[in-house]
Amino acid sequence: MQNPLQKFGDHFHLKIGQNPDIQGLQDFKNRLEKDYFSEVVVRTIPINANSTNLIIELDCNFSLVEILSHLQKGNWGATSGVRSTSPLINALDSLRKINSKIIDIEEFSLYLKDSSIIIKNIYKNSIQEQLNAILGFTALHYVHFTKKMTETPFEIYVPVFGEDIFEKNTQIRNIKRNNNHQRDYFKFWGLYFESEEDALIYNLKDKSFIPGDLLMLND
């Protein structure tokens, strides 16, 4: 049986570079490792001569509930400063200051002991702006999407779109036109469970699972 992680990966056809022409990537990586208590891998996607996107992977030796607990206590990925900026924003701002290229995050993955959270970019700077909110919503909905704390999904994919919900793929066209809004992160998530053969769509508004096929980004 194909690994569900590979199913998601099959939808992405990105040219990923290991040695990009970006200054300060090692310092950027080190800062994330310190603030998120994780081993970090950073890869690049060259967009054009003036723009590069990042794929960021964090491997953290905590469970999902532990991460949410530490987040709420403010000792993991804590916000700081008057603007309550996240460690990701602070590290990214420093990286941008020493580079002339436009830098954005294409995908952010958090791999935990019992689960993983995969977040896709849906508009300019969307991941850096919404990461803490997404993690906050994960805590808020934890009881509901874990089936009243009986089963933790081993993958949470943010966001997804249901083909039977959206007519004429309007949301997908919006993404391609960079015309989405932050609220699109908080409508539908895709969840994989060991007890389920296929992914389930979680409706954040109704705090429930709904039927339908997943429509993945970059299809």
Image: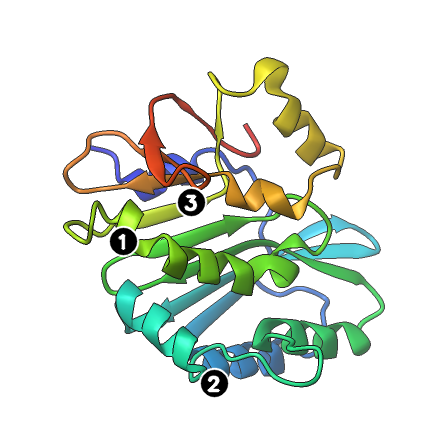
Q: Residues within 10 Å of mark 3 (few under 14, many from 20)?
A: many
Disc 3 to disc 1, C-alpha distance = 17 Å
The answer to which of 42 and 185 lies nearer the viewer is: 185
Disc 3 to disc 2, C-alpha distance = 25 Å
Residue type for callout 1: Val
Give the percent coordinates (x, y) of residue 89. Answer: 65, 72
Residue at point 55%, 83% (across, down): 31
Q: Check disc 1 and report the residue beneath it.
A: 143
Which of label 3 and label 1 is nearer to you?
Answer: 1
Above/below status of 103 relative to 72? above
Residue at point 60%, 58% (across, down): 130
Q: Check disc 3 and report the residue beneath it.
A: 157
Of the 4 image quadrants, the one containing the N terminus is: top left
Disc 2 to disc 1, C-alpha distance = 29 Å
Q: Which mark is residue 16?
A: none
Q: Which mark is residue 34?
A: 2
Say if mark 3 contacts mark 1, CB within 8 Å: no
